[in-house]
Image (cartoon, rainbow, N blue to C red):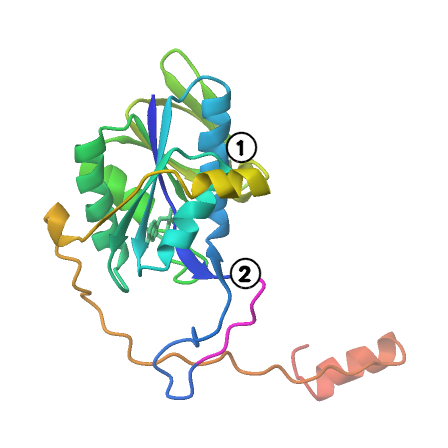
Amino acid sequence: MKILVAVKRVVDYNVKVRVKSDHTGVELANVKMSMNPFCEIAVEEAVRLKEKGVASEIIVVSIGPAQAQETIRTALAMGADRGILVTADNAEPLAIAKILQALVKKETPDLVILGKQSIDGDNNQTGQMLSALLGWSQGTFASKLEKTDAGFSITREIDGGLETLSLKLPAVVTTDLRLNEPRYASLPNIMKAKQKPLATMTPQDLGVDATPRTVTLKVTEPATRKAGIKVKDVAELVGKLKNEAKVI
Ligand code: AMP
């Protein structure tokens, strides 16, 4: 089984994001960038499927600037076999899904694994759009994935419990936080990853128009919260809620 995994390069989740002074976006200069955490989980799951003998090849795709190669190399060091970089800046989820659709046509994987969400855009759209474009089964927010004779059994965390679905292949799966704990790549594997194949192409090569359809008008910081106060006892708290906050 061939697996395609989509990985996005985003601002590292530990970085405190700052808005640019002209409000056109967030500051990216000299900011640590990493693989989107949900995409790390996607790579880890694919590697585990390969280790179990379920998968035979893992292809990692990233759409972004030339530096997204580093993100692909990280995935290769975790255990993926080869990478594809599609160079495009600020492509929107629909364009990303169309690019992935074109790559699916070219590479014919049986399973595509994506993160459920990118932590920068918070879109939560790409996996769903891709399965719609392909007409494939979809299992979103997977917290457990098991190979069955029919395809895969996937467990999803939903409000109030767990839902288990049976997916026929080919399928698109998106990962939730509790699916697995991604491994750290070892130094020998980081060195080996430098030799693994990495192809570069453009959206045009794949026949996709990745021109953005929306314009960001303004990005602003959230309003700063006022400092809280300490109260002596419940009577004072109730008094303040009643007379100052006027909420009771
Ligand atoms: P989103 O729909 O933007 O929240 O992203 C969901 C998932 O789609 C991510 O976790 C990735 O697996 C994939 N994805 C989104 N943008 C990209 C990108 N630029 N390159 C590769 N994969 C992406």
Above or below residue 53? Residue 59 is: below
Q: Are marks 2 and 1 in contact (CB under 8 Å)?
A: no
What percent of the width, then of the height, locates residue 126?
31, 48
Task: Specify the amino acid type for callout 2.
Answer: Tyr
* Nearer to the camera, 216 or 209: 209
Task: Specify the amino acid type for callout 1.
Answer: Leu
Which secondary structure is most common in the magenta stretch?
loop
Q: Name the element at disc 2.
A: loop
Residue at the farthest right position:
232
* Nearer to the camera, 244 or 69: 69
Q: Which residues are magenta?
A: 13-19
State the residue position of label 1.
Answer: 162
Could you classify mark 2 by the number of other residues whose Cα lies within 10 Å: few (under 14), some (14-19), or many (20 or more)? some
In the rendered structure, does residue 239 fall within the stretch colored magenta? no
The answer to whether 224 appears left or right of 2 in the picture is right
Could you classify mark 1 by the number of other residues whose Cα lies within 10 Å: few (under 14), some (14-19), or many (20 or more)? few
Q: Quadrant of the C terminus?
A: bottom right
Which residue is drawn at the image coordinates 37% and 77% (left, top)?
25
Check residue 13 in the rendering and tell me which mark sits there, or answer none. 2
Instruction: Say if residue 156 shows up in the picture.
Output: no
* Nearer to the camera, 98 or 107: 107
